[in-house]
Amino acid sequence: MQAYKCKMCGAGLDPVLGGICTCEYCDTKYYVSKSGNIGLAGEFCNERPQSAISQISFSIKVDDVFMITGRGVVITGEVAYGRVSVGDSVKIIKSRGQRIESTVTAVEKFRRLLDSAEQGDNVGIFLSGVTKAQIERGDYVIKGELDLVTVKEYIAGRYLPTNEKVLAIDFYRKATGLGLKEAKEAVDGIFAKR
């Protein structure tokens, strides 16, 4: 195993891979990734759980949902993250965690049809394979796969509850497409189990 030294006082460290260790002389906290990279616990390492968040390429919170005769179900809202195009497969994430598969049939902005929508756009997204009753305000529509177990392990192993919880909540929001309140509750639950 590689020898680790404290960057503050030069003392030897005895870290656990994938965890946080504290220098016994100066109390500086370090995070050691599973691959052996070390950094101050407050620093955000370049390593991200690829299977957890990198496959999420779009997220939008449903502001309103309605049915247009002859065109189908449409949701409206501001694109929170990423990009969605006509023909993309998406998942509707309900507040209780249920998921419904759907396909984007059209994207509309101010009554103008678009091929795609990007972060920051206020749009209407037409969905096929769902009914108006299946979607409600506050649900999230995401594109991609999400491994919540990996996200939870990453947060639990990477962040400190005192000074890094805000980063953990932000990370969890981006990874899951959930709102601030739901993400905060989930992260609080992760920290409570540590």
Image: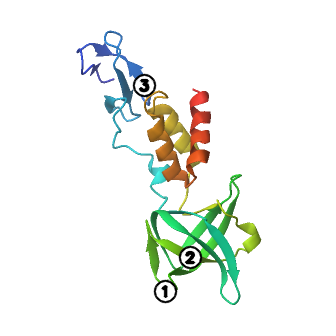
Q: Which residue corresponds to mark 2?
A: 124
Furthest-top residue in view?
A: 25
Q: Residues within 10 Å of mark 2 (few under 14, many from 20)?
A: many
Furthest-front residue in view?
A: 110
- What is the x, y in percent for residue 68? 68, 84
Quadrant showing the C terminus: top right
Q: Which residue corresponds to mark 1?
A: 112
Q: Gap between marks 2 and 3, in whole Å?
A: 44 Å
- Figure disc tally: 3
* Residue occupying the point 68% across, 54% down: 95
| 103 lies left or right of 172 | right
Which mark is first along the chain, 1 or 2?
1
Closer to the eye: label 2 or 3: 2
Q: Is residue 193 visible?
A: no
Q: Which residue corresponds to mark 3?
A: 20
Name which residue type carries label 1.
Answer: Arg
Helix, strand or loop at label 1? It is strand
Q: Gap between marks 3 and 1, in whole Å?
A: 51 Å
What is the number of the mark on residue 173?
none
Instruction: Using the image, determine if residue 160 lies above or below residue 184.
Output: above
Q: Gap between marks 2 and 1, in whole Å?
A: 10 Å
Whether label 3 touches label 1, CB < 8 Å: no
- What is the x, y in percent for residue 91? 61, 65
Instruction: Using the image, determine if residue 149 lies above or below residue 20.
Output: below
- What is the x, y in percent for residue 80? 48, 61
Which mark is first along the chain, 1 or 3?
3
| 44 lies left or right of 78 | left
Q: Residues within 10 Å of mark 3 (few under 14, many from 20)?
A: many
